[in-house]
Image (cartoon, coloured by chain):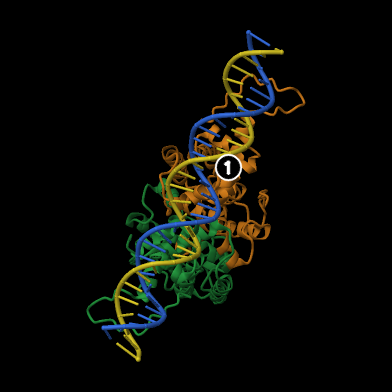
Chain colours: A orange, B green, C blue, D yellow
Amino acid sequence: MAATSNRGRTASPGQLPKRNLERTVKRLVAAAEVEFAARGFDGARTEAMARRARVNKRMLFYCFGSKQRLYREIVRRKLAARSRTLQQTPDELTPALLYWQQVVCSDGRAWRMMQWEALSNGRLVAERDRAQLMREVIERLRQRQAHRAIAPEFEPESLFIAVMALTVFPGAFPQLTRLVTGLNPRGPEFRAKWTAFLGALGERLSAANRPGRHRESARGKAPGHTTANGPTRPPGSRVADGCSAK
Amino acid sequence: MAATSNRGRTASPGQLPKRNLERTVKRLVAAAEVEFAARGFDGARTEAMARRARVNKRMLFYCFGSKQRLYREIVRRKLAARSRTLQQTPDELTPALLYWQQVVCSDGRAWRMMQWEALSNGRLVAERDRAQLMREVIERLRQRQAHRAIAPEFEPESLFIAVMALTVFPGAFPQLTRLVTGLNPRGPEFRAKWTAFLGALGERLSAANRPGRHRESARGKAPGHTTANGPTRPPGSRVADGCSAK
DNA sequence: CCGCCAATTAACCACCAGGTGAATTGCTTG
DNA sequence: CAAGCAATTCACCTGGTGGTTAATTGGCGG
C-alpha cells in the first residue's frame, strides 16, 4: 500500500524539497499511530492526524485510500515489531515477568491499541499471523517446561496468559492502579514497587520452590538446588527498566 | 436526577398504562447500560438506546437532560452494586482469586465500562468514593496479613492488583486469550482451565507454603501450621462458578 | 364531561467527520 | 524554457448524531 513512487529523488542538497511523498507517508503513519493509540479507531480524527503530521488532510486519502486502510497498515507494522520482542521472552519465569514488564511499559501505544481492539469486537487484523506467532511462543514454553525450567503443574498457556496479565494490567487499567496505590502506574515509584512484587512472585513460582507439603524436598535431594532459581535475580537488585515515563 | 414524578399511579389493574415515566426511565437505564458497555461513551448512540428501550429518543433527554448525565447516573448505580461485592472478597488468597473470577465473569458489563474508562483518560466519575472503597479493602487485607493469613512478603496493594489482573485480564483481552488458547474466554472450557490454574497458583502463594530456602520453617514452629491453608480448597475441588456465558 | 398538565411524539437543526472533485503548483525531463 | 505529471491544496458534499422546538395525547381532578 501507500504508493511510494517518488521519482528520482534528486533532493537538492541542503534544501529540504517542498514535495516528498515518502516523508509525507512517514509523517502520516507516525501521527496516525499516536491518534489511533490515544482514541481508538472510531475516536481518532483524520483531521487531527493530518494536523499532527503537518500535512493536508487530503493527503491521507491520497496515500492510504481510507482511514480503515491506514489503520490496517499501522497494525501490520506494529505486529512486525512486536513479533521480535515476543520471541525473545526469557525461559525462566522471573526474568520473563521482568522482561515483559519492560516491554509492555516501553511500548505503551501498542498495548493501548490492543486494548482498543479488545473493546471493538470486530475481526482481528492479521489473525492468522498472530495465532501462528502465539503458537510458536507457547511451544517454546512447553519445551522449556519439559526440561524442568518451569514448574510442571502449570500449563504453559495459562502461565503465558498470567505473565501478560500481571505485566499488562496496571498500565491497561491505570485508574484502578491509581485508586489502589495512589501512584501513577507509569511513574518510577509504582514501577519499582511492581518490579519488586513480580520478582518475589516469580521466585515463589519458579520450579525449584515446591509447595511445603512435599516435605521431603526441604531435606535431601541436591542441597544446592533448593535455591537454584538460576538467572532469577533477587527482587532487590533492580533490573534497569530503562523505559521513560514518556 | 431522573425526575420520577409520575403522579398518583392509579394503574388500571391488568392493563399496562400507556404512560409511565418510571417504567420509561428504567427501560432507558437498562438499554443505556448495554449500549455504553458495548461501545463506550463516545461510541454509544442515543438513538440506539432509545430503540432498544422501545422509547422515543426525545425521552432520553426529557428524563436525563444529556447523554453525559445519563452516563454518570449509570456509573453511579454500577458502583453502588460493585462496592458490595468488592467488600465481600474472601480473606484467603485462593478463595479470593476464585471469588473474583466469578464476580468478574458474572458482571462483564461493569468491567467493560471500566475498560472504556481506562482508555478515555478523562476525569473519573466518583473518584472520592471509589478511592475510599479501595482503601477499606486494602486495609482489611493488611490486617489479615498481620494475622498471617496472607504471605508476608507481598504488600497487600500489589497483591490486590495481582488478583484483579489475573481475574480480569482474560475477559478484558479476549482476543489474546483466544489467540493463545484457542478458546473463548467466556466459554466453559476456558473458565474451567483458568479456575484450575488460579487454584494451583493460589496454593503456591498462600502463606503456609514458604519457599525452600526458609529451611527452618519446615521443621519446628507449630507443627500443625505448615499445611494450614484452612479454607483453601485443593485446586481439584471445582468451586461452582455458576456464571452463565450469557 | 372538561380542562389541564405531564408524558410522548414528530420534525427539525447545527455541526462534525470521512471522503471526493478538481484546480494548483513544484519538480523533472526533454 | 516548456510540457507533463505527481504532490499538494481548497472547497465541497453527505451521512449521521446530540440536542431542541413545538405539537399532540392520555389520564386525572374537578
The structure residue drawn at horizontal position 67% and vertical position 60%, both measured from the top left corner, is A189
Is residue A156 visible in the rendered structure shown here?
A: no
Q: Quadrant of the C terminus of chain B?
A: bottom left
Q: Position of residue A17 (x, y in %)?
A: 70, 27
Q: Is residue B61 left or right of residue B51?
A: right
Up-down relation of residue B32 to residue D14 (above or below): below
Up-down relation of residue A155 to residue B201 (above or below): above
Is residue B171 visible in the rendered structure shown here?
A: yes
Q: Is residue A76 left or right of residue B241?
A: right
Residue most toward the right? Answer: A14
Which of the two residues, A244 or B73, is positioned nearer the viewer here? B73
Three-letter code, disc 1: Ala
The structure residue drawn at horizontal position 54% and vertical position 61%, both measured from the top left corner, is B211
Q: Position of residue A220 (x, y in %)?
A: 50, 57
Q: Is residue B182 left or right of residue B115?
A: left
The structure residue drawn at horizontal position 58% and vertical position 58%, both measured from the top left corner, is B121
Q: Position of residue A127 (x, y in %)?
A: 42, 40
Quadrant position of residue C5: bottom left
Q: Position of residue B151 (x, y in %)?
A: 54, 68
Q: Give me the chain letter of mark 1.
A: A
Query: Residue tagged by mark 1?
Result: A32
Helix, strand or loop at label 1? It is helix
Which of the two residues, A8 or D1, is positioned nearer the viewer here? D1
Within 10 Å of disc 1 (Cα), the crowding (few <14, some 14-19, many 20+) is many
Which of the two residues, A82 or D29, is positioned nearer the viewer here? D29
